[in-house]
Amino acid sequence: LTVLLWVVVTFFSGIVHSYSRRYMAGSTHKTRFFIAMFGFTAVVMALVAADHIALFGFLWVAMGLVMAELIGINEGWKQAQAAAMAARKYFIASSALLGVALTALWWATGATTISGIGAAADTLDGPVWLVAAGALVLAAMIQSALIPFHKWLLSAMTAPTPASALMHAGFVNAGGILLTRFAPVITVDSTFMLAVVAVGAASASGGKLLKSVQTDIKSKLGCSTVGQMGFM
């Protein structure tokens, strides 16, 4: 899984980096933008490979903060700064929920690695498991901009187009990566899985409905992303 994700991340990041050289030419924010974009790619590559839960949690926080930096890269634009601040609040909330989930899983299994938690997943049940699984799904929902946590994505249209590309083709997939890495925990109970399906279906259909009432291309793209993440 790590090797597959590394190939995908470097492939799309390389495309965006190549496009950014032309898009950001002459911009006063060029250096900051490329540092942030390279940092984002490095953090994501480390995240998909991390096994220790403390490292995974730290990288999850870092990923959100770097993306918020890209959203508000134009420090002279008030709307961009407001969008970055809103996104940062959502990402911090997602990180807090992930922290709750990781702490609960460590408490229940005694394992400090994702692989160790997966190996002990059969022993999980009761309130502690429900708190952990629920927090994981909510953290994934926020990061993937699922309804009702989609507002940060629709307000993030202030980001430069290459940053939007990283956001729509990369960052929002973090929720999917999270649920994939912790699949043994999520799949313990079939009823809980049905709830996850219901959440995804609501966002898939809701994103499509929201898209139909948007008047500009970037907002339509944002709503399309919300729907696609729900489907995923």
Image (cartoon, grey):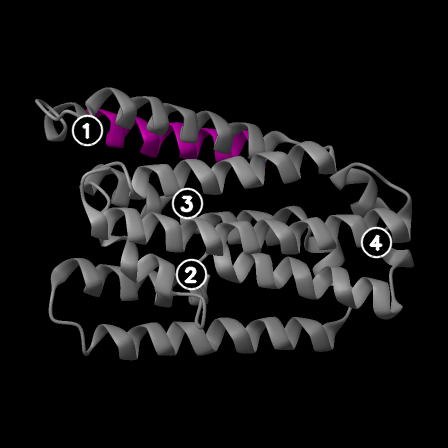
Q: Nearer the viewer, residue 30 or 207?
A: 30
Residue drawn at point x = 15 percent, y = 24 percent: 28
Look at the image and tell me whether residue 176 can be seen: no
| Residue behind mark 3 | 171
Tag shown at residue 121: 4
Comparing 48 with 29, the one in front is: 29
- Mark 4 is on which residue type? Ala
Pointer 1 or 4: first along the chain: 1
Q: Nearer the viewer, residue 36 or 117?
A: 36
Disc 2 to disc 1, C-alpha distance: 24 Å
The local crowd at label 3, few if under 14, some if 14 to 19, many if 20 or more residues have their Cα within 10 Å, is many
Question: Are there few (<14), some (14-19), or many (20+) residues within 10 Å of tag 1?
Answer: some
- The image quarter containing residue 228 is bottom left
Task: Confirm whether the magenta stretch covers residue 2.
Answer: yes
Residue 158 x, y percent position in the rendering: 21, 49
Mark 2 secondary-structure assignment: loop
The residues colored magenta run 1-18
